[in-house]
């Protein structure tokens, strides 16, 4: 939840930054393009006017303007032959120059459709200067009259002034173009400025996002602190600590949840206490009469000579024994469901060895061999509640011994696998079908094998309940070579701690 809150907060800040920063950066980029285009175009038009004048002073001024650019700006100025100077180059004939000379149109070429290319090229036509105009090629130098002109030259001179005035005020067209000026401007410093615009905002965005992430972590931890307390309380309850309570802090919703959980914990503690009392009473009330009944039947069997009566008494005794086992299984299952103890590190080898010592005499009577293999000799530690492993092994070994034929072998194997320890019990009995394996952990279910004759149907149910309570798993599978394998996966514990 903390990560989700932080991601949501950072994403919100990132969207806000994008909405406010990116448009500004694009605006500044467009402004940079526009200012540069306007500046270069204005300078090109100024040079075109000088080129249009065509006199010595104008050409000298044009040459000085062309050579005034710093070398680091990488600016090249070229002009047509009207003003030939060392600092001016002739422009390459291309479509832009053709449009300038033939149509009188200025062009601006950025070299690329995406932002700009390596160079900005501005081509501007130069028009004839309106103040000077151009004399006809056959006009004499002294201004005397030509063909059809009057001797005093008054009308001719007046006509010339009228033509000059008309040219000055009339619209310039392609016929007025006398040349063209081209400025080739390197965009290197524009690119550097572009990186500054975007880089500054990108760096600022990263800093803001980092600050937002820090603030988000602080806010998320503060908001989820009551939930972590509730989770800690729930974990203690799941480990059997029904006295755990949570502090009522945080927002109103978490306070209400904390009160509800505290009330539920108190109620559960009361119910568990009542169940403990019931289990203790039931254990005493049920075991005592069953034991007395079995003793009475044994006494009757010893004093009866009639074979038919003895057979009936033995059948009744077997039923009493089965009932006693059923009652014991129910009491064990009730204690397991109560789960009043927490798991602790236990030596798996010691528990296995102790239970094998108990069951070997019964196995020896039938010629059944119980062997221990695997890494149990390494004394692995497992997390289990005290007494749970003993009951689990007793039930599993009891079932294995009942289904094993005389002279068979029961193999107990323990293997360490990282954070888990797998304890397997393999027998050489008839095994189980897939359908039987799917129902084997159900209460009161008894298979068709030897255990189905005298079993209570609670053994594997008790095994699953105890192993699951300790955080493990149990599965049934076919043993190599036939028989059944009961595989118990237990949580491993570190040596010297849980």
Image (tube, grey):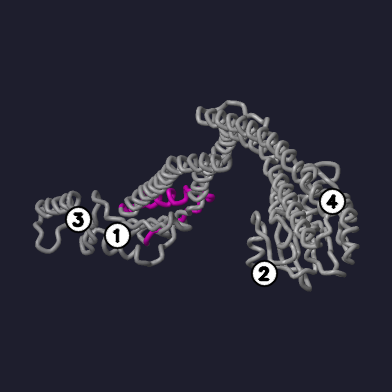
Query: Considering only order in the chain, which callout, 1 or 3, is on the residue closer to the N terminus?
Result: 3
Toward the top, the furthest residue is 248
Please tell me in which quadrant of the rendered image residue 456 appears. bottom right
Name the residue beneath numbered marker 1.
178
Residue 377 located within the stretch drawn in magenta? no
- Of badges 3 and 4, nearer the viewer stands 4
Confirm whether residue 49 shows in the render.
yes
Please determine whether, in this image, residue 480 is positioned above or below residue 269: below
Could you tell me which secondary element the residue under label 4 belongs to? helix
Please determine whether, in this image, residue 310 is positioned above or below residue 64: below
Q: Residues within 10 Å of mark 1 (few under 14, many from 20)?
A: many
Query: Considering only order in the chain, which callout, 4 or 3, is on the residue closer to the N terminus?
Result: 3
| Quadrant position of the C terminus in the picture | top right
| Quadrant position of the N terminus in the picture | top right
Please tell me in which quadrant of the rendered image residue 361 appears. bottom right
Q: Which residues are magenta?
A: 53-80
- Of badges 2 and 1, nearer the viewer stands 2
Q: Position of residue 82 (x, y in %)?
A: 35, 59
Q: Residue at x 8, y 57 (%)?
A: 150
Of residues 316 and 245, the one nearer the viewer is 316
For the residues labelled 4 and 1, the Cα–Cα distance comes to 106 Å
- Of badges 2 and 4, nearer the viewer stands 2
Query: Considering only order in the chain, which callout, 1 or 2, is on the residue closer to the N terminus?
Result: 1
Name the residue beneath numbered marker 2.
433
Query: Considering only order in the chain, which callout, 4 or 2, is on the residue closer to the N terminus?
Result: 4
Tell me the tag on residue 421.
none
Please determine whether, in this image, residue 1 is positioned above or below residue 137: above
For this view, does 141 lie left or right of residue 387?
left
Could you tell me which secondary element the residue under label 3 belongs to? loop
For the residues labelled 2 and 4, the Cα–Cα distance comes to 30 Å
């Amino acid at each position: 939840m903390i990560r989700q809150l932080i991601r949501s907060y950072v994403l919100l800040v990132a969207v806000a930054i994008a909405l406010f920063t990116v448009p500004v950066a694009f605006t500044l980029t467009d402004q940079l393009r526009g200012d540069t285009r306007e500046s270069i175009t204005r300078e090109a038009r100024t040079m075109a006017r000088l080129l249009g004048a065509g006199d010595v002073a104008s050409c000298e001024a044009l040459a000085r303007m062309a050579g005034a650019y710093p070398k680091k700006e990488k600016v090249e100025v070229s002009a047509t032959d009207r003003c030939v100077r060392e600092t001016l180059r002739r422009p390459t004939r291309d479509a832009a120059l053709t449009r300038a000379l033939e149509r009188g149109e200025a062009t601006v070429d950025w070299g690329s459709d995406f932002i700009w290319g390596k160079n900005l090229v501005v081509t501007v036509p130069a028009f004839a200067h309106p103040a000077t105009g151009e004399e006809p090629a056959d006009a004499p130098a002294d201004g005397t009259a030509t063909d059809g002109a009057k001797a005093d030259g008054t009308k001719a001179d007046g006509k010339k002034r009228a033509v000059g005035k008309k040219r000055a005020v009339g619209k310039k067209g392609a016929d007025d173009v006398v040349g063209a000026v081209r400025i080739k401007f390197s965009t290197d410093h524009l690119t550097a400025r572009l990186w500054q615009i975007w880089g500054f905002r990108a760096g600022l965005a990263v800093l803001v996002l980092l600050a937002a992430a820090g603030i988000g972590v602080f806010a998320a931890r503060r908001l989820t602190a009551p939930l972590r307390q509730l989770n800690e309380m729930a974990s203690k309850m799941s480990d059997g600590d029904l006295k755990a309570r949570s502090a009522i802090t945080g927002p109103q919703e978490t306070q209400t949840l904390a009160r509800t959980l505290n009330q539920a914990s108190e109620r559960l503690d009361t119910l568990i206490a009542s169940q403990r009392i019931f289990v203790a009473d039931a254990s005493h009330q049920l075991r005592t009469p069953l034991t007395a009944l079995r003793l009475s039947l044994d006494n009757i069997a010893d004093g009866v000579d009639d074979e038919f009566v003895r057979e009936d008494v033995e059948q009744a005794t077997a039923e009493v024994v089965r009932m006693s086992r059923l009652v014991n299984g129910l009491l064990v299952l009730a204690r397991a469901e109560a789960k009043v103890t927490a798991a602790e590190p236990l030596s798996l080898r010691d528990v296995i060895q102790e239970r094998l010592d108990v069951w070997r005499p019964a196995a020896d009577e039938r010629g059944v061999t119980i062997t221990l293999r695997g890494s149990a000799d390494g004394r692995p530690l497992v997390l289990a509640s005290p007494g749970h492993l003993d009951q689990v092994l007793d039930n599993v070994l009891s079932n294995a011994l009942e289904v094993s034929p005389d002279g068979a072998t029961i193999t107990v194997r323990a293997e360490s696998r990282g954070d888990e320890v797998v304890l397997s019990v393999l027998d050489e009995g008839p095994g189980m079908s897939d359908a039987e394996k799917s129902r084997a952990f159900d209460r009161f279910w008894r298979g068709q094998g030897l255990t189905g004759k005298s079993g209570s149907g609670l053994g594997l149910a008790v095994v699953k309940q105890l192993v699951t309570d300790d955080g493990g798993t149990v599965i049934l599978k076919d043993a190599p070579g036939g028989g059944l394998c009961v595989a118990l996966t237990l949580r491993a514990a570190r040596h010297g701690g849980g």
